[in-house]
């Protein structure tokens, strides 16, 4: 017989309403929403007023509520709700990746202290079961590479702009109208949203607690016509790619635009779809793909976590206990296409090896090998644009275009 779960729901926006629809359609045994806490009393809502309250304590202090589902967009308030819920003996399900990424170590401690679960499948790639897969299937496997598209909004925009010839503004407006992008899209287009998600995934893939700000990031807002034309000439797709790469006892991670060869599985991931490609020592390469944005796909992940609590499920964080000797580092060498605004002689000096490039009146492009940490420092300059090359790309098959081609050279 299923355990009874009464839910106290914080937030009734896109995902909250999606959760309500799933519960109404599925009618799962023993699961029901008792009360919903919202912030704006004037906003019209599709449910009777008796379901709603504007006082968080009506949920947190109600002993009949077993699980707090937190679906608000305020990370600071969400963390306060989480802490109070655990203190009151309630489990928590959340989709707030910013709150999680900034407080993971404390959240793990609080779960142990109060003997309650915090589940957050919906925080990483919507309907794709990334966290559960890493926690269970890959619990005893060394992940060599985690690579993917972790943001449906940016993938939708890139698909519409590069493949379907919309302007950036038109594609962004569409993404907002369809519910893939927020009214303020900066977290998406600047790469911050997938940066939070990668921080969370690193814990479950490698047992490492890495602050989001330590992960190098550049979003799609800097991408210009030069990158798009280069991709077309060489038959690449252009994606915002999340990557965590393990070499012996070192793990490096980044969120950066990347040229993707037509043969790569990520090249075919279009519109709001997300993908996670995992490569393990024993399992080899596997691809998970699905909708990473939208009301019902994200709400499904929330619903799955709630159902799991009926069976007393919790994350074991096995790799956190066994990751001794493994460390995070930005010392890995990557191959990058880098646009420098203007003609900067000093630009050469940051590369370990220059492999090609070209220059014209507006700026110069250099293709070469560079240490990830040096690349991260370059990204502080808003006039620098970066796109990575895939691991298996033959750079010598990529002749420089434009005038003033640069010669191959070694840089100390």
Image (tube, rainbow, N blue to C red):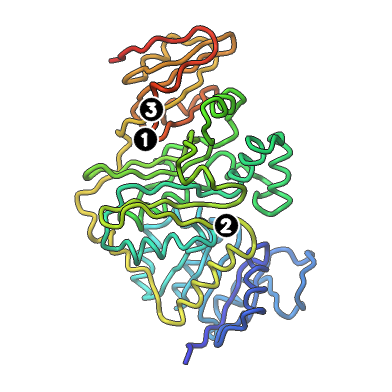
* 325 relative to 215 in the view: left or right: left
Q: Earlier in the sequence, mark 2 or mark 1?
A: 2
Q: Nearer the viewer, residue 45 or 409?
A: 409
Query: Residue 286, relative to residue 248: is it above or below?
Result: below
- Residue under the point 49% across and 45% down: 266
Residue found 38% across the figure and 18% down from its top: 355
Instruction: Work out whether 248 lies above or below 20.
Output: above
Horizontally, residue 58 falls left or right of residue 240, namely: right
Mark 1 residue crowding within 10 angstroms, few (<14) / some (14–19) / many (20+): few
Earlier residue among tags 3 and 2 = 2
Residue 40 in percent (x, y) is at 73, 63
Which residue has dot 3 on it?
394
Number of numbered markers: 3
Q: Which residue is mark 1?
A: 391
Task: State the image coordinates of residue 260 (x, y, percent, origin top left).
Answer: 48, 37
Would you call the spot at circle 3 few (<14 residues within 10 Å), some (14-19), or many (20 or more)?
Answer: few
Residue nearest the observer in this picture, 276 or 96: 276
**Residue 291 locus on image (x, y percent):** 57, 57
Q: Secondary structure at mark 3?
A: loop
Q: Nearer the viewer, mark 3 or mark 2?
A: 3
Gap in angstroms between the C-alphas marked 3 and 2: 32 Å
Residue in the picture at 46% in, 57% down:
288
Per the image, the residue denoted by label 2 is 291
């Amino acid at each position: 017989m299923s355990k009874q779960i009464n839910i106290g729901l914080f937030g009734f926006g896109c995902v909250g309403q999606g959760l309500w629809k799933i519960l109404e359609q599925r009618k799962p045994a023993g699961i029901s929403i008792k009360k919903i806490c919202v912030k704006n009393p004037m906003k019209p809502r599709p449910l009777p007023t008796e379901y709603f309250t504007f006082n968080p304590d009506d949920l947190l202090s109600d002993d009949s509520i077993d699980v707090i589902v937190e679906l608000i967009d305020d990370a600071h308030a969400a963390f306060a709700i989480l802490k109070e819920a655990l203190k009151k003996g309630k489990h928590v399900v959340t989709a707030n990746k910013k709150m999680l990424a900034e407080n993971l170590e404390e959240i793990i401690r609080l779960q142990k202290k109060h003997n309650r679960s915090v589940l957050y499948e919906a925080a990483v790639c919507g309907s794709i079961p990334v966290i559960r897969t890493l926690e269970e299937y890959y619990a005893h496997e060394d992940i060599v590479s985690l690579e993917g598209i972790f943001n449906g909004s940016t993938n939708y925009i890139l698909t519409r702009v590069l493949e379907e010839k919309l302007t950036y503004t038109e594609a962004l407006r569409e993404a907002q109208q369809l519910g893939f992008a927020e009214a303020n899209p900066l977290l998406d287009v600047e790469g911050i949203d997938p940066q939070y998600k990668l921080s969370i995934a690193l814990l479950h893939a490698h047992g490492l607690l890495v602050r989001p700000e330590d992960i190098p990031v550049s979003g799609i807002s800097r991408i210009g016509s030069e990158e798009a034309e280069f991709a077309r000439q060489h038959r690449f797709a252009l994606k915002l790619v999340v990557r965590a790469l393990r070499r012996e006892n070192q793990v490096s991670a980044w969120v950066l635009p990347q040229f993707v060869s037509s043969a790569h599985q990520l090249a075919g991931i279009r519109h709001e779809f997300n993908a996670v490609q995992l490569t393990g020592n024993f399992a080899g390469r596997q691809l998970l793909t699905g909708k990473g944005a939208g009301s019902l796909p994200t709400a499904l992940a929330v619903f799955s976590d709630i159902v799991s609590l009926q069976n007393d499920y919790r994350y074991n964080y096995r790799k956190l206990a066994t990751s001794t000797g493994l460390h995070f580092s930005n010392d890995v060498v990557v191959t990058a296409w880098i646009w420098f605004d203007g003609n900067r002689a000093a630009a050469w000096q940051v590369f370990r090896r220059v492999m090609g490039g070209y220059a014209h009146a507006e700026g110069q492009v250099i293709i070469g090998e560079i240490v990830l940490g040096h690349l991260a420092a370059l990204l502080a300059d808003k006039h620098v644009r970066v796109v990575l090359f895939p691991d298996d790309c033959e750079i010598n098959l990529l002749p420089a275009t434009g005038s003033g081609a640069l010669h191959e050279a070694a840089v100390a």
